[in-house]
Image (cartoon, rainbow, N blue to C red):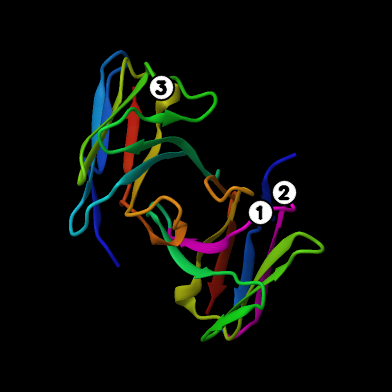
């Protein structure tokens, strides 16, 4: 079983829509969780860390569900510039290793 | 955020040649640098972790004699793909961190696209 699994999509949504991605992880003792954004042929960039209590940054909300072992990313009021691949990253139980999901592709349509 | 550069950004080479990719942290000292490979429509796969002044730690399945890593200073790490073959064609990305435990403080380079003919 993969350490991290994501629905690759693609998700095609109209501008202004709300879209949510989930990412499941296999190691219940994983310590740290992140969402990264990767534009085509570019390097990943940190979007936000995911905290147990959930966290919000503008139009983006990240949540962690330890019981069901998944993290989620919610994007409200989608913009064209949100089009990218969103990668979830999960640490090992020691915190020394990190595993990337395969990414979820989002295209926001005018 | 901090700046990490990679050179070259794109390289095309013949099968059997060796290719060196440089990763530099431009405005901070990176105690640890990571090398990743990403095939089309796949996730980043960690290849190796290098700490300045010591041997790199390779992930399972990555041949250390084929992917030579040198982390000679706190601002420079190099990855040499030796005797490259078409199956080595990929997007290679490095990242640099002041502290490997702080993943969110890991800054990625822009990547190097390698095509082996």
Same-chain check, marks 1 and 2: yes
Judged left or right of residue A32, residue B19 is left
Is B14 one of the magenta-colored residues?
no
Q: Mark 1 falls within which chain? A: A
Residue at x 81%, y 64% (from the top left corner): A67
Viewer-nearest of labels 1 and 3? 1
Q: Mark 2 falls within which chain? A: A
Q: Secondary structure at mark 3?
A: helix
Q: Position of residue B37 (x, y in %)?
A: 44, 38
Q: Which mark is residue A30?
A: 1
The residue beneath circle 2 is A27
The residue beneath circle 3 is B86
Separation (CA) of disc 1 from disc 2: 6 Å
Figure quadrant of residue B16: top left
Q: Secondary structure at mark 1?
A: loop
Q: Position of residue B31 (x, y in %)?
A: 30, 47
Viewer-nearest of labels 3 and 2? 2
Q: Secondary structure at mark 2?
A: loop
**Residues rendered magenta in the picture:** A16-39
Judged left or right of residue A28, residue B35 is left
């Amino acid at each position: 079983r993969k350490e991290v699994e994501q629905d690759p999509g693609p998700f095609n949504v109209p501008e202004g829509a709300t879209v949510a991605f989930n990412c499941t992880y296999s190691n219940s003792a994983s310590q740290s969780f992140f969402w990264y954004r990767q534009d085509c042929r570019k390097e990943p960039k940190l979007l936000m860390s995911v905290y147990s209590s959930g966290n919000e940054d503008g139009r983006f909300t990240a949540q962690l569900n330890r019981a069901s072992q998944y993290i989620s990313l919610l994007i409200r009021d989608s913009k064209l510039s949100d089009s990218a691949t969103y990668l979830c990253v999960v640490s090992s139980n020691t915190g020394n290793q990190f595993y990337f999901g395969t990414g979820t592709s989002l295209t926001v349509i005018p | 955020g901090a700046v990490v550069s990679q050179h070259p950004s794109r390289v095309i080479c013949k099968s059997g040649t060796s290719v060196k990719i440089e990763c530099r942290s431009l405005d901070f000292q990176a105690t640890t640098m990571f090398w990743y490979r990403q095939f089309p429509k796949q996730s980043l796969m960690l290849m190796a972790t290098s700490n300045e002044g010591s041997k790199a730690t390779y992930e399972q399945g990555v041949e250390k004699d084929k992917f030579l890593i040198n982390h000679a200073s706190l601002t420079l790490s190099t990855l040499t793909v030796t005797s490259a073959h078409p199956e080595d064609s990929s997007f290679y990305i490095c990242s640099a961190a002041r502290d490997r435990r702080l993943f969110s403080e890991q800054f990625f380079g822009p990547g190097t696209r390698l095509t082996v003919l």
